[in-house]
Image (cartoon, grey):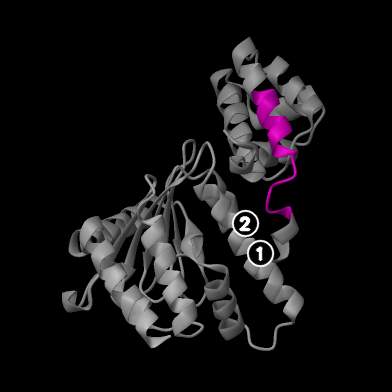
Amino acid sequence: MAANRISPPLRQRRLGRILRDLRTREQITLAQTGRRLGWSTAKVGRIEAGQTRPSPEDVSASLELFRAPAELRRTCMTLAAQAAARPWWAPYKSVLGEYVALETEAALVRSWQPQLVEGLLQTEAYARALVLADLPGVGQAEVNLRVRARMARQQLLVGEDPLSLSVVLAEDALRVPVGGARVMAAQVARLVDAAQWPTVTVRVLPRRVGAHPGMSGAFVLLSLPHDPVSVFVEGAPQEIITDQAALVRDYERRFDRLAASALSAEDSLEILGQIARELDTGC
């Protein structure tokens, strides 16, 4: 996996799960593990829950106690090193939340956007216009940082190990001239370009569909190689990120219905081109 696709928090969680599974296989309790390693029971629990990053020495001692096979020991030591690494988003940590840790390792991102263009496909000018509108009075330095962070996230779409992105976008999101007609024209042109990449699918939900299962707001589903699918729900009083199975299944069904109601990828390209021409005329 490419370096920019490694998420230290997720590697830490995966390491903790492996150590927990090894311990339970050996039928050793948390308390017994703590006594044998000279740790508190709480420390063992935090490491297994991915809440505490163990040192390489801690990992090695645990593997010895649990009689881990050689190949799994190598995997765990690699995970321990990756968990301690500086993530690519460190320069933007103050303006990026927990979501980026999941997005970084996602194999597939499914995004429903009723009002805005998906962040991974935004142009710099469009992103800047959104930040200025959403955070009036914020200093220029923070505006610049937020925009740079959004542009940096887009590197996940390129390179040797790009994530796959499937976006369903409401037609209304394309009709609001964020930043003015010129900015919006460039943004729609960007969508036309990205929609032709092999790992990106953009489908437009036309206005004529009427009521649909995405009217309550935007959401994003993140499928990861070694973790359960998570859903990020935007627009609520407090944004939600959860892998609770029942809630994830509900949002997966919603996305499937939205995708089924949307135009095909080919017809979506056609309406995107039409809107781009309309915006060019208005510039």
Q: Characterize the magenta stretch by its predominant secondary structure.
A: helix
User: Is 38 included in the stretch rendered in magenta?
Assistant: no
- Residue 87 lies in the magenta-colored region: yes
The residue at the point 55 percent across, 55 percent down is 154
How many angstroms separate mark 1 from mark 2 (CA)? 6 Å
Q: Position of residue 37 (x, y in %)?
A: 79, 24
Q: Residue 218 vs residue 105: left or right? A: left
Q: Which residues are magenta?
A: 76-90
Q: Quadrant of residue 41?
A: top right
Which residue, given by chain and number where applicable, does mark 1 sit on?
Answer: 148
* Res. 96 visible in picture: no
Q: Quadrant of the C terminus?
A: bottom left
Question: Which residue matches tag 2?
Answer: 152
For the residue pair 281 and 89, the one nearer the viewer reads as 281
Within the image, what quadrant is residue 216 found in? bottom left
Q: Is residue 11 above or below residue 115?
A: above
- Which amino acid does the dot numbered 2 rest on? Ala
Residue 202, which numbered label? Answer: none
Image side of residue 176 versus residue 10, left or right: left
x and y percentages locating residue 91 in the rendered image? 75, 57
Residue 89, image x, y percentages: 68, 53
For the N terminus, the quadrant is: top right
- Answer above or below: position of 36 versus 201: above
**Contact check, label 1 and label 2, Cβ < 8 Å:** yes
Amino acid at pointer 1: Arg
Q: Secondary structure under badge 1?
A: helix
Q: Which is more toward the observer, 43 or 29?
A: 43
Residue at 78 percent of width and 36 percent of height: 40
Q: Nearer the viewer, residue 75 or 205?
A: 205
Residue at disc 2, secondary structure:
helix
Residue 171 appears anywhere in the view: yes
Q: Is residue 230 rendered to the left or right of residue 247?
A: right
